[in-house]
Amino acid sequence: MLSRLVILTVVCIAALASASVSQAQQAVPIGTWVTVEKTDDGRYVGVLLSADEREVLLDSTAIGSVMIPRTLVRSILPAAGQASQQRALAAQTLPFSSRYFITTNGFPIGDDGAYILFTTFGPDFQFAPTENLSVGILTTYIGSPILGSIKATTRVSDNVNAAAGALIGWNGWIPEFIFFALPYGSLTFGSRASNVTLSTGYGYVSYDGDGGGRAMFSVAGQTHAWSKVSLMFDSIILSAGSSTGMLVFGMPGVRVATGRNSAFQVAFPFVYAENELRMVPVPTVGYFVRM
């Protein structure tokens, strides 16, 4: 009789504990950052997408969407006070964070290895033969002109990365000979989650024997806004020439990671020249695909 009473007491305590945990889990709002602890002491951190008596669906910062059977869930707790850390962690897993709309930064391509960026103007192929070196080919959808790119990166400190590279191009199949070269250097301050990059270079163009160049600058940056969304800004600044003034081409926009192997971006360009700001009427779009 006593043993039955002890067993009944234990069962009741377990049921109450389970109900308490279940109520606590259900109290966590959908769409918030949570930490899911499993019964095997495993842990996932991410955005809670759904939760019922059978399973928990989580947008994990480590491996993307993951479905966990409810029987393996010990607790679902809000990740309070850790929003900035979670955004930084999630951004580390976002693909293609080594570049902006046009320019690049001091981070290596890394795990992306190789990718194609389809833009409004044409495709951009990028490869990483080694960890800190990338090479690529850029062109238009008609195959002319053609540009080759190379970039080497190095880590200066925890929050500073540097890059040196060049773009070299020619006319392709168009009869008139055109040569273009742009050596550049970049310093990136911050992490892949949030950073600012300052770049400088010299652009040289030769057309049928006549050539000239201008100093070029760029200020670009990005910040990881939420989940798979990043706010972006890119720019190209041409120094004043002998007969022309300074020209600023800016591109604010947004990038959305549509998966671990793809991302979509859209920018709304503007041009500042001769003390006048003009918006470009057509947005610039791009789509990344990892090869």
Image (tube, helix red, strand yellow):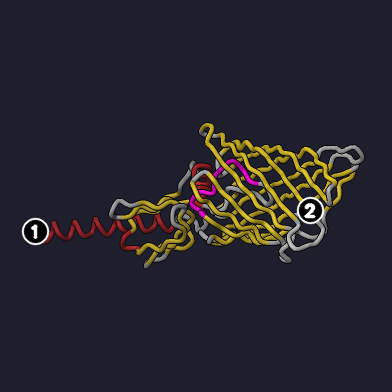
Task: Name which quarter of the figure residue 284 lies in.
Answer: bottom right
Viewer-nearest residue: 188 or 54 = 188
Instruction: Residue 178: give its label.
Output: 2
> Where the N terminus falls, by quadrant?
bottom left
Specify which label sits upstream in the sequence, 2 or 1. 1
Q: Tags 2 and 1 in contact by the CB under 8 Å rule?
A: no
Q: Residues within 10 Å of mark 1 (few under 14, many from 20)?
A: few
| Highlighted magenta segment, given as a residue range | 104-113
Mark 1 is on which residue type? Answer: Ser
Q: Is residue 144 left or right of residue 261?
A: right
Q: Main secondary structure of the magenta part?
A: loop
Q: Residue furthest left?
A: 1
- Is label 1 in a helix, a strand or a loop? helix
Task: Name which quarter of the figure residue 120 lies in.
Answer: bottom right
State how far apart marks 2 and 1 are (Cα). Answer: 93 Å
Query: Label 1, on which residue?
Result: 3
